[in-house]
Amino acid sequence: MSTEYTWFIEPKDAHTNRVLSENLNAEDFSDGINTAEGKKQLWKCNSAFITYLNKSKISLNVNFRIFNQQGKGQIRPFKIPWKKIIKKLPDTKKTS
């Protein structure tokens, strides 16, 4: 049995809200959804759109937060679990 998730985006500025309105359906917008942090202005979308938006964050100049809901549970903020990649650089110190 797989768990169903619903995804939401909270625009942090008017430009981001405009970009979302151009890419999502008007019926996917809700002004005042109850979340774990209180009422929020959220756009409902799928995970593929979140991936696209996150990868295009700089080129689209958008600022947003991601929320998700597991089943019929509470809508909560979601942080993308980035793995930190640490590359070891060769030692460049010169010995005399």
Image (cartoon, rainbow, N blue to C red):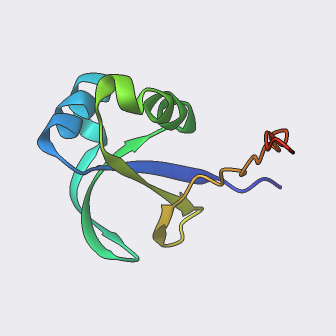
Q: Height in image: 82 above or below 60?
A: below
Outermost residue to the left: 14
Give the camera-side residue of 94 and 38.
Answer: 94
Residue drawn at x 49%, y 37% is 50
Among the 4 quarters of the image, the one containing residue 57:
top left
Q: Quadrant of the N terminus?
A: bottom right
Q: Is residue 72 left or right of residue 37?
A: right
Figure check: 49 above or below 84: above
Provide residue 40's location: percent of width, then percent of height.
25, 64
- How many numbered dots are placed on residues in this image? 0
Which residue does the image show at 79% across and 44% down from the upper left?
A: 93
- In the image, what residue occupies the spot 43% across and 32% down? 53
Q: Is 78 on the left or on the right of 34, as rendered? A: right
The C terminus sits in image quarter = top right
Residue 52 in the image: above or below residue 54: above
Quarter of the figure with residue 37? bottom left
Expressed as whole percent of the image width and height from the top left, the position of residue 31 reads: 18, 56
**Residue 83 vs residue 72, the one in the foreground:** 83
Task: Residue at 24%, 29% (x, y): give it.
Answer: 19
Residue closest to the eye, 91 or 25: 91
- The image position of residue 34, as x and y in percent, is 31, 71
